[in-house]
Amino acid sequence: MPNSVSRPTLTRRRFTQLSGMAIGSLALSGAGRAAEAPDVMLEIGPYTLEASPKHQIRTMAYNGQIPGPLFRMREGKSQSVEIRNRTKDPEIVHWHGLYLPADIDGAMEEGTPMIAPGASTRYTMTPKPAGFRWYHTHTFAGKNLTKAQYSGLHGFLLIEPHDNAAAYDREIFLGLHDWNGQLLSSDDGYMNPVYDVATINGKMLGFGDPIKIKQGERVMMHILNSSPTEVHWISFSGHSFKVVALDGNPVDQAQTVSMLRLAPAERVSAIVEMNNPGVWVLGEVRKHVQASGMGIVIEYANSAGKPVWTQPEDLKWNYRQFAAPGDAAQHQDTKAIELNFDSRFQGHGNEELWRINGLSYPQNSTASNSPILQTGQRYRLVMKNKSMDDHPMHLHRHTFEVRRIGDSGEIAGVRKDVVLVHAGGTVEVEFVADNPGKTLFHCHQQDHMDRGFMMVFHYA
Amino acid sequence: MRNSTIKLAANAIFAMAAIVCVRSAVAQGNYEIQVYGADTVAPKTLMAELHSNFTPEGQKYYIDGVIPTNHQEHETLELTEGITSWSEIGFYVFTSEQDGHGVQWVGDHIRPRVRAPDSWHLPVGLSLSTEVGYQRAVYSPDTWTWEIRPIIDKTVGRWYFAVNPALERTLHGPDVNQGLGFSPGVKVSYDFTRVVSGGVEYYADYGRLGAFDSLHKQQQQIFVVADLNTSPKWEINVGVGVGPTASTDHLIVKGILGRRFDWRHHSPVE
């Protein structure tokens, strides 16, 4: 039944609890597992991250490393995947940015089965589209700020195109993450996560090995913000970034910028010309975040000395600089879906309950309340953020094009799967409904999605 | 050698006990009527508060030369400057206005405070304040007083709880030999909306620690209060309180208007 939807009473928390019973059909016992080694093997298990000698963080990891292993896949080439859950909780792996069927995309709200503790699952997937993607857990954390995206369950995924011009000499993958969160009252009086430790590739500034590069190299930096809740601003002292792709998708106007802004789940791919020998810091622009550890040393060959950090004085970023002028009349048959974001007050000692069009998940995702998509139809999501927080909005299993930000004119050529919608602002994006199945749309802040900020779109 | 050590220790304990355990009830304050929350003012931030307390029904007679509280209007200016993320210091200027006495300066206090840093990950808010100051004898027979006030608070959903089990001591005045008094404050409130919270505040002075006064002599006040959370910059609290015991002013109306001034350089990278 194509229009089947989640039962309204089935919350994420309840789904997690029940998943152990529901997993039988996909879980494979050790005896029944296929003998052939999978192309992709992920084992989820406990891990102690040494962010610095003084910061040992007990968490979960993929294959005993944080970030998880980098997987390179050829676009369109089938991959067998095996995932083993060696934790005490049900788990699930979301392949962020891929056009996968709903039953393996990795969101229980779409119908992907959870992997029970001690169980394994195996399936085959065809990765597309090409670009810098990632994979991560997609479970419920609630007030436990060590679980779900607060943990170390994230890793890089690069889907390589059939022909890669590769206008660079080497690639560097950098993952930004925040740790040791606790819920504290913020200036607005509500409970928000704050963090003691921030890392790049699992290490605090000064405690990991420096990245060694050579003068004259053109380095493609693939940067991922896997933080559960925080936006990050990144600068590389003495250098600039030529941004060529956002969320893995080439931009219309590649621009050279002094800093990057990455909302949770966003990725930036940028080429850096290594033309300024020395020992430099690449790190968070905001002083208190860099002081928590978010930075990494980049060292030229034959250079030595104390790493140099040049403190920027402003935060600069705008999606529009990577876009071409758009034509509002380009797609006359586009159907608009208006999505209003707000929250319901739950007390100053509580997080807010988040709503899309006046309802929280799962109430907003019944057949009568959520959008029904027609295959092949182009849709414009008009996202109006009526809350006091910024929200990184993510659409599963599809790529959208940013068409309008606030009151600016129409734009084109910026294709993404996450877009930051500022407090009080409006962002309009368009996508073609070309991947039937339940499609999850949600704020990528873990605390917000845990508090109802999700909606499932259904295909007719 | 061993005996002399024990004797020395015993003498020290007796001396401390003598300092601590001598006190009787002090005169009513009613200049700053507030149950403290555990949070401190952020560094480079000044919190300016005006406490306005009126006593429609209070003490009508002079006692030991102290001006009666009936129909007194107390205006107290409280300035609190944040020092670090876990400490602050507050200053008070107490005034009183009353028919026949005009506007009078009453006294000044200073109040340093520290709190448990967030990195301790305590399940409750916890801070410790100490306050010392002078007030004129015509408004309080004890002219120099000292207070130490542990502060514990907790927010649970829409509910807020705060307890201030304060200990007070007279440093100069008739009660100087009366030792440490117990003056707790308690607040329970509920968030009705994002802006309006309402609840109850309880203030008491039970008298000397270990030998509380009789109920008749204890000071006890119960206020019905409302807090308006209109903005992070503003603090608004209003309340009406009754004092059911003979030693307490019977009816008090209070209000607190606070404004936060941020001196920090607001560079976006800070």
Image (cartoon, coloured by chain):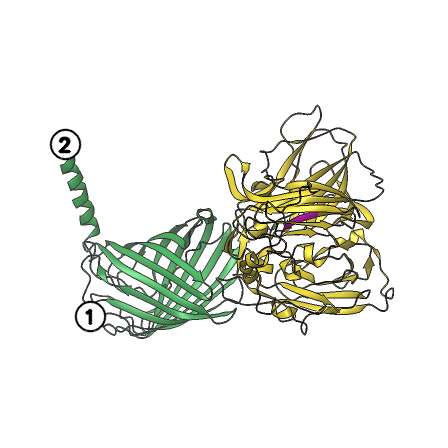
Chain colours: A yellow, B green
Q: Do the residues indicated by labels 2 and 1 lie within the same chain of the protein? A: yes
Residue placed furthest toward the left = B3
**Does any portion of residue A124 appear in the rendered image?**
yes
> What residue is rendered at 26% in x and 67% in y?
B219
**Residue corresponding to mark 1:** B216
Q: CA distance from mark 2 to mark 1?
A: 48 Å
For this rendering, which residue is in front, A400 or A98?
A98
Chief SS of the magenta region: strand
Q: Chain of mark 2?
A: B
**Does any portion of residue A395 appear in the rendered image?**
no
Report the mark closest to the observer, 2 or 1.
2
Classed neighbour count for the residue bearing mark 2: other residues with Cα under 10 Å, few (<14), some (14–19), many (≥20): few
**Residue corresponding to mark 2:** B2
User: Looking at the picture, how far across and down is residue A20, in whole percent?
Assistant: 55, 56
Whether residue B134 sits left or right of residue A392 in the image: it is: left
Q: Secondary structure at mark 1?
A: loop
Q: Quadrant of residue A376?
A: bottom right
User: Looking at the picture, how far across and down is residue A128, in whole percent?
Assistant: 78, 50
**Type of amino acid at the residue the image marks with label 1:** His
For this rendering, which residue is in front, B118 or A115?
A115
Q: Quadrant of the C terminus of chain A?
A: bottom right
> What residue is rendered at 64% in x and 36% in y?
A296
Q: Secondary structure at mark 2?
A: helix
Q: Which residues are magenta?
A: A134-139
Q: Chain of mark 1?
A: B
